[in-house]
Amino acid sequence: MTPSLFSVAGKTALVTGGSRGIGLMIARGLVEAGAKVYLSSRKAAACEEAAAELSKLGEAVSLPADLSRDEEVDRLASEIAEREDGLHILVNNAGATWGAPLEEFPVSGWDKVMTLNLRSPFLLTRALLPRLRAAGSAEDPARVINVGSIDGLHVPGLPTYSYSASKAALHHLTRVLAKDLGPQAITVNAIAPGPFESKMMAATLEAFGEEIAAAAPLGRIGRPDDMAGIAVYLSSRAGAYVTGAVIPVDGGLATTV
């Protein structure tokens, strides 16, 4: 085994929701492994700040976009197309959550989460297909990585109805797209993170962090390198023959507890 097995040197990636949390962990890992990474997020200032931070390690570019809006999905895809002939790696990470008791759960909370977590990854992948096709080959396919959740694999303990439903749907969309796009030299896989330190998880970890860590067979919550590692694996030669997989990265919570 050689270091090049896990290299993404010379590849170009787009990471949505890349300015913080899991998206930033993935973006950092790809930059450190040699990729040129475009970061997108709704907040331009945060996106610029993250890109500036990662530029100290490699090549990172800020492309802000609000992917809850269809026209912004199209604009982001157009900006990538204007800058790059091919896109080797697309990480669909931008997402939202919402929690409320069943009787009080608002339609707006359902629609917001479903749009950003499921509709937007589908539309962005579709819009970027020409660039993904251009970058992929039989020996080294282009990669689509969807960021799901262990809440799409088991029933969550919190009343996050739209979140868990959207992530389960994204996992299955991953399999459907893998079948369709495999013959076009594009792999499609999903990462299903467990508890990681992020803004989305901050309140939960503050209240229940010790209990969550204790419940995992590995006895801890996720670290940035854990997320970077799985993303680099799926993006590199090491992951070139993997498609249609939903990979839990959760210390064993979803599969053993």
Image (cartoon, rainbow, N blue to C red):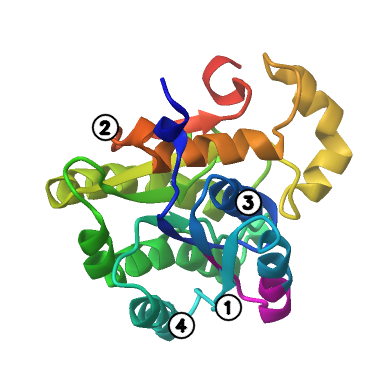
Q: CA distance from mark 4 to mark 1?
A: 9 Å
Look at mark 4 in the image and give the residue it sits on. Answer: 72
Left or right position of 87 against 249: left
Could you say where residue 243 lies in the image, as x and y percent from the top left? 28, 37
Mark before the other along the chain sequence, 3 or 2: 3
Disc 1 and disc 2: Cα gap in Å?
A: 32 Å
Q: Which mark is residue 64?
A: 1
Percent from the top left, x then y, of residue 205?
Answer: 81, 40
Question: In the image, which residues are magenta?
Answer: 38-48
| Mark 4 element type | helix
Q: Which residue is mark 3?
A: 28
Sequence-first tag of 4 and 3: 3
Task: Identify the amino acid type marked 3.
Answer: Arg
Question: Where is mark 2, residue-wise?
Answer: 241
Q: Sequence-wise, which precedes: disc 3 or disc 1? A: 3
Tell me the distance, in whole angstroms, between the alpha carbons under discs 3 and 2. 24 Å
**Image depth: mark 4 or mark 2 in front:** 2
Residue type (three-letter) at the residue carrying disc 2 = Tyr
Q: Is residue 40 visible?
A: no
Residue 98 falls within the magenta-colored stretch: no
Front residue of 92/205: it is: 92
Residue sitting at 27 percent across and 61 percent down? 132
Q: Residues within 10 Å of mark 2 (few under 14, many from 20)?
A: few
| Mark 1 burial class by Cα count in 10 Å: few <14, some 14-19, many 20+ | many
